[in-house]
Image: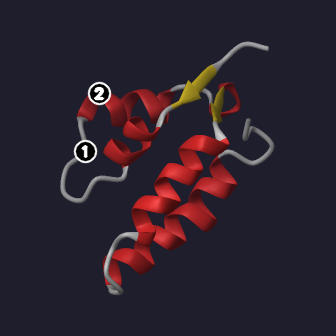
Amino acid sequence: MSGFLIDTNVLSEYNRPGVPDAGVKRWLETTDRQSQSVSVITLAEIQKGIELLVEGRRRVRLEQWLTQDLEAWFSGRVL
């Protein structure tokens, strides 16, 4: 198996409010998605961070990002 294991800090930067780092954004968007994987630990870290937020729009948006966007992005490539 070859490819890239995407860490929490990379996904957090990509989804950062405002303007994410251009290099991170460019790399994630130009690297073949089929070569990108994510660890269950990374997903758990993101989930825990979301759970620590107060109820509100930001929390809802991040929950949707985790359960919809990331699920589709890494479909079949969660290690």
Disc 1 is placed on an element classified as loop
Up-down relation of residue 51 to residue 4 (above or below): below
> Taking 15 as reference, is 24 above or below it?
above
- Residue identified by numbered label 1: 20
Q: Position of residue 33 (x, y in %)?
A: 63, 34
- Residue 15 is situated, as x and y percent measured from the top left of the image, at 36, 53
Q: Position of residue 57 (x, y in %)?
A: 33, 83
Dot label at residue 1: none
Which quadrant, please, contains the N terminus? top right
Q: Quadrant of the C terminus?
A: top right
| Image-quadrant location for residue 10 | top left
Left or right: 29 with respect to 76? left
Identify the residue at horizontal 54%, vertical 43% (top origin): 42
Q: Position of residue 44 (x, y in %)?
A: 57, 52
The amino acid on which the numbered mark 1 sits, given as a three-letter code, is Pro
Q: Nearer the viewer, residue 78 or 41?
A: 41
10 Å crowding of disc 2: few (<14), some (14-19), many (20+): few
Image height check: is 45 above or below 10? Answer: below
Residue found at the very far bottom of the displayed protein: 56
Q: Is residue 12 left or right of residue 18?
A: right
Q: Residues within 10 Å of mark 1 (few under 14, many from 20)?
A: few
For image coordinates 42% across by 27% down, the residue present is: 27
Q: Amino acid at mark 2?
A: Gly
Which residue is at 25% across, 34% downward? 22
The secondary element bearing badge 2 is classed as: helix
**Numbered circles on residues, count:** 2
Residue linked to disc 2: 23
Name which residue lies at 42% across and 74% down: 61
